């Protein structure tokens, strides 16, 4: 499992690079439909990022919720680091990604509650 922890920074770096490239090229106009479409696309991206990180995390409790929280915190920190040096176009995309992160993280919480309720 310790090998997974060595891979984790590379996974974050790959997703961070993809995020940067997409955010710099994705223009969000003032059209709400375009923004909602972008939000939906970012939700898929963040979901894939979270799944990749959760699969590599080795937390003693092995709780899906704890792993999801750790993954979400890691991703949020990366986004905050970008926000301080980003252009307005990237900043808009960061806001959408954070919204997507909250949405995806919420799904993990719901899955956790449902599985614990069923047990």
Image (tube, grey):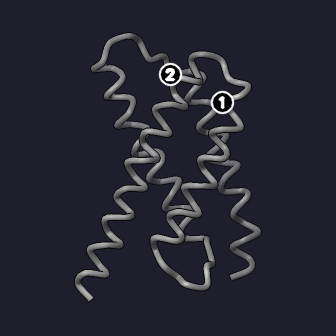
- The CA distance from mark 1 to mark 2 is 16 Å
Image coords of residue 30 (percent x, y) = 38, 10
Q: Which of the pair 20/35 is nearer the observer?
A: 35
Position of 9 with respect to 116 (left or right) is right
Residue at image point 55% right, 84% down: 61
Most extreme residue toward the top, as rendered? 30
Give residue 98's position: percent from left, percent from top: 50, 39
**Image quarter of the N terminus:** bottom right
Q: Badge 2 is on which residue?
A: 26
State the image coordinates of residue 83 (x, y, percent, origin top left): 66, 30
Closer to the chain start, of discs 1 and 2, is 2
Coordinates of residue 66 in the picture (x, y in percent):
52, 71
Q: Which residue is mark 1?
A: 83
92 w.r.t. 115: above or below: above
Along the line of sight, the residue nearer the viewer: 45 or 111? 111
- Outermost residue, left side: 118
User: Which type of secondary structure does the marked residue at label 1 adopt?
Assistant: helix
Choose top left, top right, bottom left or bottom right for residue 113: bottom left
Q: Vertically, is 13 above or below 65?
A: above
Q: Secondary structure at mark 2?
A: loop
Residue at the (27%, 89%) spot, across then down: 119
| Quadrant in which residue 91 is drawn | top right
- Please tell me the numbered disc located at residue 94: none
Question: Going by the picture, which residue comes out furthest to the bottom?
Answer: 119
Residue 7 appears left or right of 44: right
Residue 116 position by quadrant:
bottom left
Q: Which residue does the image show at 54% across and 61% down from the upper left? A: 52
Q: Is residue 22 left or right of residue 29?
A: right
Q: Residues within 10 Å of mark 1 (few under 14, many from 20)?
A: some
Seen in the picture, residue 34 relative to 114 is either above or below; the reply is above
Mark 2 surroundings: few (<14), some (14-19) or many (≥20) residues within 10 A:
some
Foreground tag (1 vs 2): 1
């Amino acid at each position: 499992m310790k090998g997974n922890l060595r891979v984790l920074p590379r996974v974050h770096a790959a997703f961070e690079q993809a995020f940067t490239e997409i955010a710099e090229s994705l223009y969000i106009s003032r059209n709400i439909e375009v923004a909602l479409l972008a939000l939906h696309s970012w939700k898929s991206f963040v979901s894939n990022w979270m799944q990749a990180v959760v699969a590599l995390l080795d937390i003693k409790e092995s709780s899906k919720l704890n792993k999801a929280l750790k993954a979400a915190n890691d991703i949020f920190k990366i986004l905050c680091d970008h926000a301080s040096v980003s252009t307005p176009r990237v900043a808009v995309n960061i806001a959408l990604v954070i919204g997507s992160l909250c949405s995806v993280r919420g799904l993990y919480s719901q899955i956790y509650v449902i599985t614990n309720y069923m047990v």
